[in-house]
Amino acid sequence: MGSSGIPIVDLSPFFRSDGDGDEGEKKKSMQVIAEACSDYGFFQIVNHGVPLDLMSRALELSTTWFQNNPDEEKLMSRPPSHLPLPAGYGRQPEHSPDKNEYLVLFPPNSGFNVYPQNPPQFMEVLEEIFSHLTRTGGVVESILNECLGFPPEFLKEYNHDRSWDIMTALHYFPATENENNGNSEHEDGNLFTFVIQDEVGGLQVRKNGEWIPVTPEQGTIIVNVGDVIQVLSNKKFKSATHRVVRKEGLSRFSYAFFYNLEGEKWVEPLPQFTKEIGEAPKYRGFQYKEYQELRIRNKTHPPSKPEDAIHITHYAI
Ligand SMILES: O=C(O)CCC(=O)C(=O)O
Ligand SMILES: [Fe+2]
Protein backbone atom coordinates (compact mmCIF):
# COMPACT_ATOMS: atom_id res chain seq x y z
CA MET A 1 0.00 0.00 0.00
CA GLY A 2 1.33 3.47 -0.80
CA SER A 3 1.03 6.28 1.72
CA SER A 4 -2.10 7.46 -0.09
CA GLY A 5 -3.81 4.09 0.35
CA ILE A 6 -3.53 3.28 -3.37
CA PRO A 7 -2.07 -0.25 -3.70
CA ILE A 8 1.50 -0.63 -4.94
CA VAL A 9 2.08 -3.82 -6.90
CA ASP A 10 5.52 -5.36 -7.52
CA LEU A 11 5.61 -6.51 -11.15
CA SER A 12 8.96 -8.33 -10.92
CA PRO A 13 7.37 -11.84 -10.97
CA PHE A 14 5.84 -10.98 -14.34
CA PHE A 15 9.22 -10.11 -15.83
CA ARG A 16 10.97 -13.30 -14.66
CA SER A 17 10.80 -16.41 -16.77
CA ASP A 18 8.31 -18.75 -15.09
CA GLY A 19 9.97 -20.50 -12.19
CA ASP A 20 8.50 -22.32 -9.21
CA GLY A 21 7.14 -20.01 -6.60
CA ASP A 22 6.35 -17.20 -9.03
CA GLU A 23 2.81 -18.37 -9.66
CA GLY A 24 1.78 -17.71 -6.06
CA GLU A 25 3.29 -14.21 -6.14
CA LYS A 26 1.61 -13.47 -9.44
CA LYS A 27 -1.76 -14.61 -8.12
CA LYS A 28 -1.46 -12.35 -5.08
CA SER A 29 -0.59 -9.35 -7.23
CA MET A 30 -3.43 -10.11 -9.58
CA GLN A 31 -5.89 -10.25 -6.69
CA VAL A 32 -4.78 -6.80 -5.55
CA ILE A 33 -5.07 -5.42 -9.08
CA ALA A 34 -8.48 -7.03 -9.69
CA GLU A 35 -9.81 -5.58 -6.45
CA ALA A 36 -8.48 -2.09 -7.17
CA CYS A 37 -9.91 -2.21 -10.71
CA SER A 38 -13.32 -3.40 -9.52
CA ASP A 39 -13.48 -0.61 -6.93
CA TYR A 40 -12.02 2.50 -8.60
CA GLY A 41 -9.60 1.58 -11.42
CA PHE A 42 -6.32 2.82 -9.94
CA PHE A 43 -3.10 1.19 -8.72
CA GLN A 44 0.65 1.80 -8.78
CA ILE A 45 3.46 -0.43 -10.00
CA VAL A 46 7.11 -0.90 -9.02
CA ASN A 47 9.77 -3.14 -10.62
CA HIS A 48 7.88 -2.36 -13.80
CA GLY A 49 10.78 -2.74 -16.21
CA VAL A 50 11.29 0.99 -16.87
CA PRO A 51 14.77 1.99 -15.64
CA LEU A 52 14.48 4.44 -12.74
CA ASP A 53 17.31 6.65 -14.00
CA LEU A 54 15.51 6.93 -17.35
CA MET A 55 12.35 8.08 -15.57
CA SER A 56 14.26 10.77 -13.62
CA ARG A 57 16.13 11.82 -16.73
CA ALA A 58 12.93 12.17 -18.74
CA LEU A 59 11.40 14.38 -16.02
CA GLU A 60 14.56 16.52 -15.76
CA LEU A 61 14.68 17.03 -19.52
CA SER A 62 11.02 17.92 -19.89
CA THR A 63 11.37 20.39 -17.00
CA THR A 64 14.32 22.02 -18.75
CA TRP A 65 12.53 22.04 -22.09
CA PHE A 66 9.30 23.58 -20.83
CA GLN A 67 11.17 26.17 -18.80
CA ASN A 68 13.76 27.21 -21.36
CA ASN A 69 12.76 26.16 -24.81
CA PRO A 70 12.71 28.83 -27.45
CA ASP A 71 9.32 29.99 -28.62
CA GLU A 72 10.09 28.72 -32.12
CA GLU A 73 9.95 25.19 -30.76
CA LYS A 74 6.78 25.85 -28.84
CA LEU A 75 5.25 27.35 -31.93
CA MET A 76 6.45 24.65 -34.28
CA SER A 77 3.80 23.51 -36.71
CA ARG A 78 1.77 20.47 -35.77
CA PRO A 79 0.88 18.72 -39.03
CA PRO A 80 -2.27 16.57 -39.03
CA SER A 81 -1.66 12.94 -38.09
CA HIS A 82 -3.42 9.57 -38.30
CA LEU A 83 -5.01 10.31 -34.90
CA PRO A 84 -7.58 13.00 -34.20
CA LEU A 85 -4.78 15.05 -32.61
CA PRO A 86 -1.41 16.23 -33.94
CA ALA A 87 1.99 15.47 -32.42
CA GLY A 88 4.10 18.28 -30.95
CA TYR A 89 3.63 21.15 -28.55
CA GLY A 90 0.19 22.30 -27.46
CA ARG A 91 -1.35 24.46 -24.81
CA GLN A 92 -4.89 24.39 -23.45
CA PRO A 93 -7.00 27.12 -25.05
CA GLU A 94 -7.36 30.33 -23.02
CA HIS A 95 -11.01 29.57 -22.14
CA SER A 96 -10.17 26.07 -20.86
CA PRO A 97 -10.39 25.48 -17.11
CA ASP A 98 -7.28 23.26 -17.47
CA LYS A 99 -4.05 25.15 -17.02
CA ASN A 100 -1.29 23.14 -18.61
CA GLU A 101 0.92 22.88 -21.67
CA TYR A 102 2.07 19.63 -23.21
CA LEU A 103 4.11 17.82 -25.81
CA VAL A 104 2.43 14.93 -27.66
CA LEU A 105 4.49 12.03 -28.99
CA PHE A 106 3.56 9.03 -31.10
CA PRO A 107 5.58 5.79 -31.16
CA PRO A 108 9.26 6.27 -32.07
CA ASN A 109 8.83 4.77 -35.54
CA SER A 110 5.97 7.12 -36.42
CA GLY A 111 6.57 9.54 -39.26
CA PHE A 112 4.18 12.03 -37.61
CA ASN A 113 6.36 12.96 -34.64
CA VAL A 114 7.53 16.55 -34.17
CA TYR A 115 10.49 16.37 -31.81
CA PRO A 116 12.05 19.09 -29.68
CA GLN A 117 15.63 19.84 -30.70
CA ASN A 118 16.91 21.08 -27.34
CA PRO A 119 18.35 19.77 -25.12
CA PRO A 120 19.78 17.48 -27.83
CA GLN A 121 19.44 14.30 -25.70
CA PHE A 122 15.72 14.93 -25.11
CA MET A 123 14.49 13.22 -28.28
CA GLU A 124 16.52 10.08 -27.61
CA VAL A 125 15.28 9.85 -24.01
CA LEU A 126 11.68 10.34 -25.15
CA GLU A 127 12.00 7.52 -27.66
CA GLU A 128 13.65 5.25 -25.13
CA ILE A 129 11.07 5.76 -22.41
CA PHE A 130 8.26 5.39 -24.95
CA SER A 131 9.63 1.96 -25.93
CA HIS A 132 9.95 0.85 -22.30
CA LEU A 133 6.44 2.00 -21.46
CA THR A 134 5.11 0.11 -24.48
CA ARG A 135 6.71 -3.09 -23.23
CA THR A 136 5.36 -2.55 -19.69
CA GLY A 137 1.99 -1.81 -21.29
CA GLY A 138 2.03 -5.28 -22.86
CA VAL A 139 2.71 -6.82 -19.45
CA VAL A 140 -0.09 -4.87 -17.73
CA GLU A 141 -2.42 -5.71 -20.62
CA SER A 142 -1.74 -9.43 -20.14
CA ILE A 143 -2.32 -9.10 -16.37
CA LEU A 144 -5.67 -7.38 -16.94
CA ASN A 145 -6.48 -10.06 -19.52
CA GLU A 146 -6.02 -12.74 -16.90
CA CYS A 147 -7.76 -10.77 -14.13
CA LEU A 148 -10.80 -10.48 -16.39
CA GLY A 149 -10.73 -14.20 -17.20
CA PHE A 150 -10.23 -13.70 -20.94
CA PRO A 151 -8.68 -16.49 -23.01
CA PRO A 152 -4.86 -16.16 -23.04
CA GLU A 153 -3.71 -13.32 -25.33
CA PHE A 154 -7.27 -12.17 -26.06
CA LEU A 155 -6.49 -8.48 -25.43
CA LYS A 156 -3.12 -8.78 -27.16
CA GLU A 157 -4.77 -10.03 -30.34
CA TYR A 158 -7.70 -7.62 -30.15
CA ASN A 159 -5.27 -4.75 -29.58
CA HIS A 160 -2.22 -5.76 -31.62
CA ASP A 161 -1.68 -2.45 -33.41
CA ARG A 162 0.41 -0.06 -31.30
CA SER A 163 0.34 2.88 -33.72
CA TRP A 164 -2.35 4.75 -31.74
CA ASP A 165 -0.42 4.84 -28.45
CA ILE A 166 0.64 8.30 -27.33
CA MET A 167 2.78 9.82 -24.64
CA THR A 168 2.41 13.37 -23.38
CA ALA A 169 4.94 15.34 -21.40
CA LEU A 170 2.94 17.77 -19.26
CA HIS A 171 3.70 21.03 -17.51
CA TYR A 172 1.13 22.40 -15.04
CA PHE A 173 1.50 26.09 -14.20
CA PRO A 174 1.60 27.21 -10.56
CA ALA A 175 -1.83 27.83 -9.03
CA THR A 176 -2.95 31.41 -8.58
CA GLU A 177 -4.74 32.81 -5.56
CA ASN A 178 -8.06 32.34 -7.36
CA GLU A 179 -7.83 29.01 -9.06
CA ASN A 180 -5.87 25.77 -8.98
CA ASN A 181 -7.36 23.51 -11.65
CA GLY A 182 -4.69 21.65 -13.64
CA ASN A 183 -6.66 18.89 -15.30
CA SER A 184 -10.39 18.75 -14.56
CA GLU A 185 -12.08 15.67 -13.20
CA HIS A 186 -12.20 13.05 -15.96
CA GLU A 187 -11.81 9.42 -16.95
CA ASP A 188 -9.38 8.41 -19.68
CA GLY A 189 -10.99 7.06 -22.87
CA ASN A 190 -8.44 4.32 -23.62
CA LEU A 191 -7.51 0.88 -22.19
CA PHE A 192 -5.25 2.24 -19.45
CA THR A 193 -2.78 5.03 -18.79
CA PHE A 194 0.59 5.14 -17.04
CA VAL A 195 1.48 8.34 -15.18
CA ILE A 196 4.94 9.32 -14.04
CA GLN A 197 4.84 12.37 -11.79
CA ASP A 198 7.51 14.55 -10.22
CA GLU A 199 7.74 15.21 -6.47
CA VAL A 200 5.27 18.14 -6.47
CA GLY A 201 2.10 16.04 -6.34
CA GLY A 202 -1.40 17.14 -7.25
CA LEU A 203 -2.84 14.02 -8.92
CA GLN A 204 -5.99 12.87 -7.14
CA VAL A 205 -8.24 9.86 -7.66
CA ARG A 206 -11.85 9.48 -6.56
CA LYS A 207 -12.30 6.52 -4.28
CA ASN A 208 -15.54 5.84 -2.42
CA GLY A 209 -16.73 9.36 -3.21
CA GLU A 210 -13.61 11.05 -1.82
CA TRP A 211 -10.67 12.67 -3.58
CA ILE A 212 -7.49 10.82 -2.56
CA PRO A 213 -4.13 12.50 -3.32
CA VAL A 214 -1.72 10.15 -5.07
CA THR A 215 1.43 10.89 -3.07
CA PRO A 216 4.52 10.97 -5.30
CA GLU A 217 6.79 7.95 -4.70
CA GLN A 218 9.96 8.05 -6.73
CA GLY A 219 10.25 5.27 -9.29
CA THR A 220 6.57 4.35 -9.06
CA ILE A 221 4.30 4.34 -12.10
CA ILE A 222 0.61 5.04 -11.60
CA VAL A 223 -1.84 2.97 -13.64
CA ASN A 224 -5.37 4.12 -14.27
CA VAL A 225 -7.90 2.02 -16.07
CA GLY A 226 -9.76 3.70 -18.95
CA ASP A 227 -13.18 3.54 -20.56
CA VAL A 228 -12.38 0.77 -23.07
CA ILE A 229 -11.71 -1.75 -20.28
CA GLN A 230 -14.82 -0.54 -18.47
CA VAL A 231 -16.98 -1.08 -21.57
CA LEU A 232 -15.47 -4.47 -22.60
CA SER A 233 -16.02 -5.76 -19.05
CA ASN A 234 -19.52 -4.23 -18.84
CA LYS A 235 -18.34 -2.16 -15.87
CA LYS A 236 -16.80 -5.03 -13.90
CA PHE A 237 -13.61 -2.97 -13.98
CA LYS A 238 -13.99 0.78 -13.47
CA SER A 239 -12.48 3.61 -15.40
CA ALA A 240 -10.74 5.76 -12.77
CA THR A 241 -12.06 9.26 -12.10
CA HIS A 242 -9.08 11.53 -11.52
CA ARG A 243 -7.91 15.14 -11.73
CA VAL A 244 -4.84 17.29 -11.19
CA VAL A 245 -4.86 20.16 -8.70
CA ARG A 246 -2.11 22.77 -9.05
CA LYS A 247 0.02 24.02 -6.15
CA GLU A 248 0.72 27.67 -5.45
CA GLY A 249 4.24 28.76 -6.36
CA LEU A 250 5.16 25.40 -7.95
CA SER A 251 5.18 24.10 -11.49
CA ARG A 252 4.43 20.39 -11.83
CA PHE A 253 5.82 18.08 -14.52
CA SER A 254 4.52 14.64 -15.44
CA TYR A 255 4.26 12.13 -18.25
CA ALA A 256 1.11 10.28 -19.26
CA PHE A 257 1.41 7.25 -21.53
CA PHE A 258 -1.88 6.24 -23.12
CA TYR A 259 -2.14 2.57 -24.03
CA ASN A 260 -4.72 2.90 -26.77
CA LEU A 261 -6.60 0.92 -29.36
CA GLU A 262 -6.36 1.27 -33.12
CA GLY A 263 -9.00 3.75 -34.33
CA GLU A 264 -11.08 1.39 -36.49
CA LYS A 265 -11.63 -1.06 -33.61
CA TRP A 266 -15.14 -1.74 -32.38
CA VAL A 267 -15.71 -1.53 -28.62
CA GLU A 268 -18.68 -3.16 -26.89
CA PRO A 269 -19.43 -5.19 -23.76
CA LEU A 270 -18.21 -8.76 -24.34
CA PRO A 271 -20.60 -11.75 -24.17
CA GLN A 272 -18.85 -13.24 -21.12
CA PHE A 273 -19.94 -10.16 -19.13
CA THR A 274 -23.42 -9.93 -20.65
CA LYS A 275 -25.46 -12.67 -22.29
CA GLU A 276 -23.34 -15.55 -21.00
CA ILE A 277 -24.09 -14.49 -17.44
CA GLY A 278 -27.58 -13.17 -18.05
CA GLU A 279 -26.71 -9.47 -17.67
CA ALA A 280 -27.88 -6.67 -19.92
CA PRO A 281 -25.12 -4.69 -21.70
CA LYS A 282 -24.58 -1.31 -20.03
CA TYR A 283 -23.23 0.31 -23.23
CA ARG A 284 -23.96 0.24 -26.94
CA GLY A 285 -21.00 -0.47 -29.20
CA PHE A 286 -18.92 2.25 -30.86
CA GLN A 287 -15.87 2.71 -33.00
CA TYR A 288 -12.86 3.78 -30.95
CA LYS A 289 -11.94 6.72 -33.16
CA GLU A 290 -15.49 8.10 -33.12
CA TYR A 291 -15.32 8.32 -29.32
CA GLN A 292 -11.82 9.84 -29.36
CA GLU A 293 -12.94 12.50 -31.86
CA LEU A 294 -15.87 13.44 -29.63
CA ARG A 295 -13.58 13.68 -26.60
CA ILE A 296 -11.13 15.91 -28.42
CA ARG A 297 -13.98 18.13 -29.56
CA ASN A 298 -14.85 18.59 -25.84
CA LYS A 299 -11.41 20.16 -25.44
CA THR A 300 -11.20 22.23 -28.63
CA HIS A 301 -14.84 23.40 -28.57
CA PRO A 302 -15.81 23.18 -24.92
CA PRO A 303 -19.59 22.90 -24.51
CA SER A 304 -21.20 25.82 -22.72
CA LYS A 305 -22.21 23.56 -19.80
CA PRO A 306 -19.71 21.02 -18.39
CA GLU A 307 -22.51 18.43 -18.25
CA ASP A 308 -22.74 18.56 -22.07
CA ALA A 309 -19.19 17.23 -22.46
CA ILE A 310 -19.04 13.75 -23.98
CA HIS A 311 -18.00 10.95 -21.62
CA ILE A 312 -18.52 7.22 -21.83
CA THR A 313 -22.06 7.82 -20.53
CA HIS A 314 -22.77 8.98 -24.12
CA TYR A 315 -22.95 5.28 -25.04
CA ALA A 316 -24.68 4.11 -21.87
CA ILE A 317 -27.87 2.12 -22.35
O1 LIG B 1 -0.50 14.69 -15.17
C1 LIG B 1 -1.08 13.79 -14.56
O2 LIG B 1 -0.72 13.41 -13.46
C2 LIG B 1 -2.32 13.13 -15.12
C3 LIG B 1 -2.66 13.51 -16.54
C4 LIG B 1 -3.97 12.98 -16.97
O3 LIG B 1 -4.80 12.56 -16.20
C5 LIG B 1 -4.29 12.94 -18.41
O4 LIG B 1 -3.56 13.56 -19.20
O5 LIG B 1 -5.29 12.29 -18.78
FE1 LIG C 1 -6.23 11.29 -17.24
Image (spheres, rainbow, N blue to C red):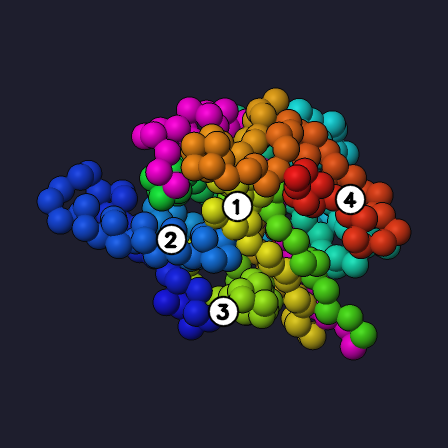
Q: What residue type is labelled 1?
A: Lys
Q: Mark 1 points at which residue?
A: 235
Question: Label 4, label 2: how many angstroms apart (C-alpha)?
Answer: 31 Å
Q: Which amino acid does label 3 sit on?
A: Thr
Q: Which of marks 1 and 4 is nearer the N terminus?
A: 1
Q: What residue type is labelled 4?
A: Asn
Occupied quadrant, residue 148 = top left
Q: Where is residue 298 in the image (x, y as percent from the top left)?
A: 78, 44
Question: Label 3, label 4: how many angstroms apart (C-alpha)?
Answer: 29 Å
Q: Is residue 21 left or right of residue 134?
A: left
Q: Position of residue 123 (x, y in %)?
A: 55, 39
In the image, which residues are magenta? Answer: 148-177
Q: Mark 2 points at which residue?
A: 33
Q: Is residue 174 magenta?
A: yes
Question: Label 1, label 2: how many angstroms apart (C-alpha)?
Answer: 15 Å
Tell me, for residue 215, which label it has, or none: 3
Q: Which residue lies furthest to the front in this view?
A: 278
Q: Is residue 304 visible?
A: yes
